[in-house]
Amino acid sequence: MKSTWFGDSRRYEFSRLLREADYSRRHDELFSIFLTCAVCTFEQAGNCFQGRGRNDVVEQEHVRAVAQVKHPEKLVEALCCLVDALEERAYDFLGCVLQELSLNDKSYRGQCFTPAEVSECMAQMALVGLERPQGRRLSISEPACGCGAMVIAVAKYLKQQEYGPGDFYVHAVDVDHRCAEATYLQCSLLDIPAIVEHGNTLTLETFKQRPTLALLRTEATRPRNAFSQAAEAIEELIAERHEGASLGPALEKPMASSQLQFSFE
């Protein structure tokens, strides 16, 4: 691994720390292990925030991931590096790392992540002039989110327009579990209210959903209407029959297109 592979010193440092976690493992393995450890940590924080306590299944997944590397402390340092990078600039850091390490699936899934500059330009073009009805929340659907480039760009633009965390939320989906986890992690660190789904937009399959802490905070203070109460009742019924199933805010706004969509609730 050479520093010239990377367009940014932070991304080189991040990749170097992953490499130092265990030289016997491939880059793709280390990247996946890092994502699992970090995502489990934030997922447990969400469980505790909701008063559920630590989830044993998530905890065991985290322990198994940590045990796969010889120097797990390097994963912690890599997370710190990611935090520092996103504090400097809100963009798809992890998607850039994936491409610079050639870990994106170009042959099967055709993965090619949108550069931050293009994402920000597209977000501004899509949202400029958008009227903001009083008392209504903007819902954003991203059916092929990758590692979150467009989600981050849209949230960045909305915050510049003085949208608060309670004024919008994102429903992001990707068929690649690594991308869904990367989106969830970066949205959590950037305080973006989102529910991130590992699923297939075309077949409407859902494998895993994770709400960010920002979304959980806003949902906790948001007035509940009859429809959201009905959604919760349906979610409880499904959970009884399929352990671990979750619908969350995605039920309120189902994915209806393969393109980025905006609407007000």
Image (spheres, rainbow, N blue to C red):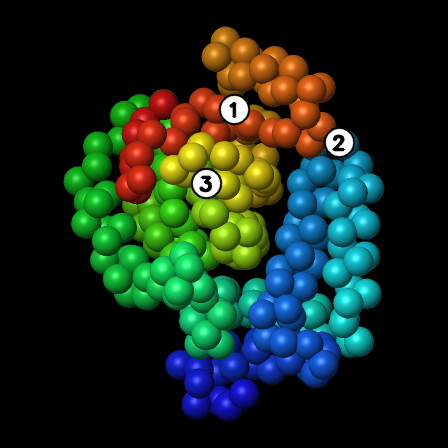
Residue highlighted by disc 2: 51
* Residue 156 position (above or below residue 220): below
What residue do we see at 28% from left, 65% from top? 117
Q: What element carries label 1?
A: loop
Residue highlighted by disc 3: 200
- For the question of whether residue 91 can be seen, the reply is no
What residue do we see at 29% from left, 58% from top? 119
Real-space Cα distance between discs 2 and 3?
A: 30 Å
* Residue 244 position (above or below residue 115): above
Numbered disc in front, either 1 or 3: 3
Q: What element carries label 3?
A: strand
Real-space Cα distance between discs 1 and 3?
A: 29 Å
**Rendering quarter of residue 27:** bottom right
Numbered disc in front, either 2 or 1: 2
* Residue 118 position (above or below residue 166): below
Numbered disc in front, either 2 or 3: 3
What residue do we see at 75% from left, 31% from top? 51
Amino acid type, mark 1: Arg
x and y, in percent, of residue 235 in the image: 60, 20
Q: Look at the numbered discs 2 and 1 and tell me whether their residues touch, using CB distance below 8 Å.
A: no
x and y, in percent, of residue 18 in the image: 64, 75
* In-front residue for pair 107/117: 107
Residue highlighted by disc 1: 222
In the picture as drawn, the residue positioned furthest to the top comes out as: 226
- For the question of whether residue 146 can be seen, the reply is yes
What residue do we see at 49% from left, 89% from top? 3
Q: What element carries label 2?
A: loop
